[in-house]
Image (tube, coloured by chain):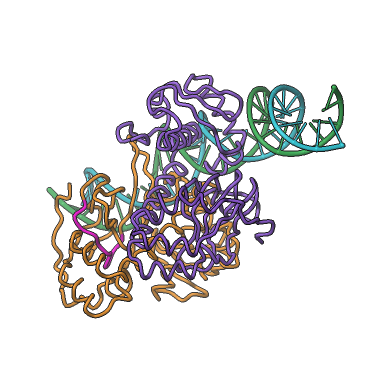
Chain colours: A orange, B purple, C cyan, D green
DNA sequence: TGATCCGCTTGATCCTGATCAAGGTTATGG
DNA sequence: CCATAACCTTGATCAGGATCAAGCGGATCA
């Protein structure tokens, strides 16, 4: 696999914006640790739709998403697929200490990742406890998110699922400062209806219908197919079925 | 909360069987690290049905299950609940570096856990990299399991869900050496029909019906309500919908 | 300028699993 | 020993979402 991967034209001087350095693995590293990370890193980019890795492949690197969006998913023999994670800028890809990729990773938009060769990275981790600590915290966060998503998949209605997905995407955009946190939030859907369906355990028709229903109810306003305006975030949160206090935006 | 917790009558000399020492956090620790772990540990037990901790509570300890079974779950205001994990002997409870419990933990059978006060444990972790490494590996395993479960919740039919649960429980019993791995496997269900339903995102009636259906199809044989005999594991695995190669028993 | 494709929407119908309801089994306790 | 309460099974009916099907609108390309 992994045909058609191209090494990125990403300028190494853009290193300053490398999420490894600033937001992911190494946010608490000392300067000399950063230097050592720099020594083993390189960039790669993928076009929308390209696979980054297939479940079962040997992974010879770990990586951090610089820009773009990728999905983590599983597919059954008969074609049913379930997305198990959404990889956004600053998210980490890979398993130190493991050889085989457990899930498929596919770029859904143009994607640039910052890679570290696995062996040197693991050695660096062994000699730099703060990296391991940071990675443990990130993994615990991912585990909590995965478990929260299990409630969505197992117990929520189609309408609640859609509202939950929109709320999660909205929260991310707030965190990234792309939209105000209060009223008139605006949001670009990074996923096709089918990808949303795979994320939510629904069919694409149901996704489409429920989005239309939320639109008709005035919970969201659609501009085109992919741009969503949320007039009142509280109304959207009420549709998720979650406890409103301590909800997704806090 | 946490009323009615009793300190265990567990004999400290049984320390030799403490899973922290042998299977969980410290399987690769040096003897002096084990001594330091011993210095901050204590046992607790809970009766079937008792809560260990509620989501949002402050956790002043981390722990490892010694014996019995607990569940990790989430409940919506309207009562819908989703189990997000099953805690069996040797499983770890808690989040170093976090203060609040993210999910409810409830004992479903009589339960004994080996606790470590959180602060000293975190200090020990900071000074003993192998503990952190071990914990990272365990957390990555849990994350993979959680993600595999997302496929079950999102895409499998009721019958496949039941078969998947039975396969997982069967695999555990094989690993623990309770039953032969090949033919005529036998298995005690540790959960009520309702708990299975909460794990699988179903109702208890559907669970009951699908178990009856698998029985009628000869995939399983029931002795009483809780004891299951699996005449041919391959037949059960075929019912899970999973790829049979590399399936749950390997 | 069409022709084609892809992503999306909407309608009609079906089916799986939820819900409502009744009764059976097993364990516990007076 | 029976009474009670969990826990479980089974039946009848309902409904939410899947499936099958048709068509729309905006890209891309010859």
Residue at the spot 45% in from the left edge and 46% down from the top edge: A201
| Front-most of residues A240 and A25 | A25
The reply to whether residue A208 is visible in this rendering is no
Which residue reaches farthest bottom? A31
Indicate the position of residue C28 as horizontal and vertical percent values: 74, 36
Q: Is residue A68 magenta?
A: yes
Point out the stretch of residues depicted in magenta.
A59-69
| Front-most of residues C15 and B62 | B62
Q: Please tell me how many numbered marks the rendered image carries.
A: 0
Q: Quadrant of residue C25?
A: top right
Indicate the position of residue B134 as horizontal and vertical percent values: 35, 57
Left or right of A104, for residue B231 = right
| Front-most of residues D6 and B10 | B10
| Above/below status of B149 relative to B29 | above
Main SS of the magenta part reads strand
Q: Quadrant of residue B180?
A: top left
| Above/below status of C30 relative to B211 | below
Indicate the position of residue A139 as horizontal and vertical percent values: 38, 60
Left or right of A60, for residue A128 = right
Residue at the spot 18% in from the left edge and 72% down from the top edge: A38
Indicate the position of residue D8 as horizontal and vertical percent values: 63, 30
Q: Is residue B152 magenta?
A: no
The reply to whether residue B197 is visible in this rendering is yes
| Above/below status of A145 relative to C11 | below
């Amino acid at each position: 696999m992994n045909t058609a991967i191209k090494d990125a034209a990403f300028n190494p001087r853009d290193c300053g914006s490398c999420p490894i350095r600033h937001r992911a693995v190494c946010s608490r590293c000392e300067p000399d640790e950063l230097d050592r990370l720099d020594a083993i890193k390189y960039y790669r980019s993928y076009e929308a739709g390209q696979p980054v890795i297939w479940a079962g492949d040997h992974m010879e690197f770990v990586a951090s998403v610089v820009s773009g969006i990728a999905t983590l998913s599983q597919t059954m023999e008969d074609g049913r697929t379930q997305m198990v994670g959404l990889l956004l800028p600053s998210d980490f890809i890979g398993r130190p200490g493991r050889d085989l990729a457990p899930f498929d990773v596919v770029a859904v938009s143009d994607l640039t990742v910052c890679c570290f060769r696995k062996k040197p990275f693991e050695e660096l981790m062994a000699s730099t406890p703060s990296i391991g600590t940071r990675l443990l915290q990130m993994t615990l966060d991912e585990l909590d998110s995965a478990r929260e998503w299990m409630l969505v998949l197992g117990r929520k209605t189609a309408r609640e699922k859609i509202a939950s997905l929109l709320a999660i995407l909205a929260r991310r955009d707030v965190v990234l400062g792309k939209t105000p946190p209060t009223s008139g939030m605006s949001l670009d859907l990074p996923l096709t209806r089918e990808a949303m369906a795979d994320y939510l355990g629904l069919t694409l028709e149901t996704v489409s219908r429920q989005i239309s229903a939320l639109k008709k109810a005035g919970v969201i306003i659609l501009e085109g197919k992919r741009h969503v305006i949320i007039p009142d975030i509280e109304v959207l949160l009420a549709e998720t079925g979650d406890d409103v206090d301590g909800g997704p935006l806090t």
